[in-house]
Amino acid sequence: MFTCARNVHIALALSLTLAASSYSAPVPDACDRACLEGMVNTYLSALLKHDPTALPMAADVKYTENQDLVKMGDGLWRDAEQVSNYKIYASDPERGQVGFMGAVKGSGSWTMIALRLRVIAKRIVEVEAILPGRVANAAAFGFGDAAAKLTTPRAAFAQALASSERRDRSVLINAADLHYEGVERGNGDIVPFSDECIKIENGLQLIQNPNFAFPAASPTGRKLPNFAAMGCRDQFNTHIWDTDTITDRRYPIVDRERGIVMTFVMYNEYARARCADVVDYGLVCPPVNVKPLTLVLSEAFKIRDGEIHEVEAVFTVLPGLRLRGVW
């Protein structure tokens, strides 16, 4: 058993090294933090004007929304109206990448947005956006007006860490990846969660929130455990997420100064089974019959002293299962 576990850790370390190597080349004529975050602000300003032509942008810029290739100027560019004060930035000057999470109003309604820009020689060469919009299960999760209610940014994400609290790039990536390993293994003990870990998804707090009821049901009609009232570690340890897998994991942005890793993954709900076998309870199933489907998901992990303290997640729901994106 020990040898097997050791081999798993070696394989995981190798996979993380390969994932990190995709973004390891130094960036020529790179932007510093102020430059990168200025690029985001310039981008958002142009977005609200519905005019990308003034952006410092490569002629062959690659732009996606929800893992679909989109022509620059289409999609959200056509109807963006307002960006709220709820803003999270993650900057990686070493790799020329910058991430943003916030709330944006388009076509009269608010939605979350996760945004990644890659900058080379102070020109935008890649833009990746995730926009929940009217997601398939918005009503079930109560996401419908959550983005509209967000006004105050989460202060922790803007705070620089003391030098003693910071960790190397590989350690930060490993912590984020262990979060996904914990989902797939139903094991919160392998994830470096802090005891006060809080997770907000599409503007809604789904951890340590006893007033929220998960959209799930028991086949026998029994009252469900209050999953949302639990902490991050305890919720994972119930095995409620054993039905799911996470593929196409990417870790393009590591902000060592603030202790933020911004990930982009394909989260596959019910890919393994329709119902989870919850510890000391039994089967927990979706309230309606659903087929496996994929969430296009980005998460920002705030990691201090090697522990995950806060998580911000933005996702949209695809109509079916899709294990890989276009990046």
Image (cartoon, grey):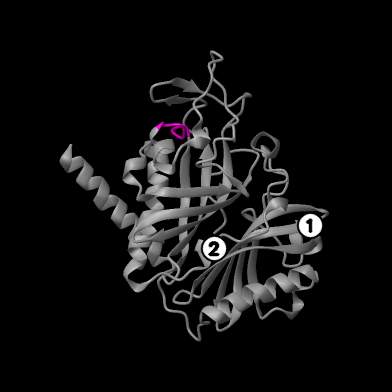
* Left or right side of 249 for 191: left
How far apart marks 2 and 1 lie (CA) works out to 26 Å
Q: Quadrant of residue 282?
A: top left
Residue 155 is labelled as: 2
* Between 211 and 214, the one nearer to me in the picture: 211
- At 48% from the left edge and 28% from the top edge, which residue is drawn? 273
Q: Secondary structure beneath disc 2?
A: helix
> What amino acid is labelled 2 in the image?
Ala
| Residue 192 versus residue 123 in the image, above or below | above
What percent of the width, then of the height, locates residue 24? Answer: 40, 71
Where does the image place residue 194, in percent across and percent down from the top left?
Answer: 38, 50
In this image, 260 relative to 319: left or right? left
Give the labeled residue for mark 1. 106
Residue 88: x and y, percent? 58, 64
Q: Residue furthest bottom?
A: 29
Residues in magenta, as a range? 238-243
Residue at image location 68% in from the left, 40% down from the top:
138
Farthest residue in the right direction?
A: 108
Query: Could you tell me the amino acid type at mark 1?
Result: Gly
Report whether 35 appears left or right of 242: right
Could you say whether the residue bearing mark 1 is in a helix, strand or loop?
strand
Q: Position of residue 216 (x, y in %)?
A: 57, 27
The answer to whether residue 241 is magenta is yes
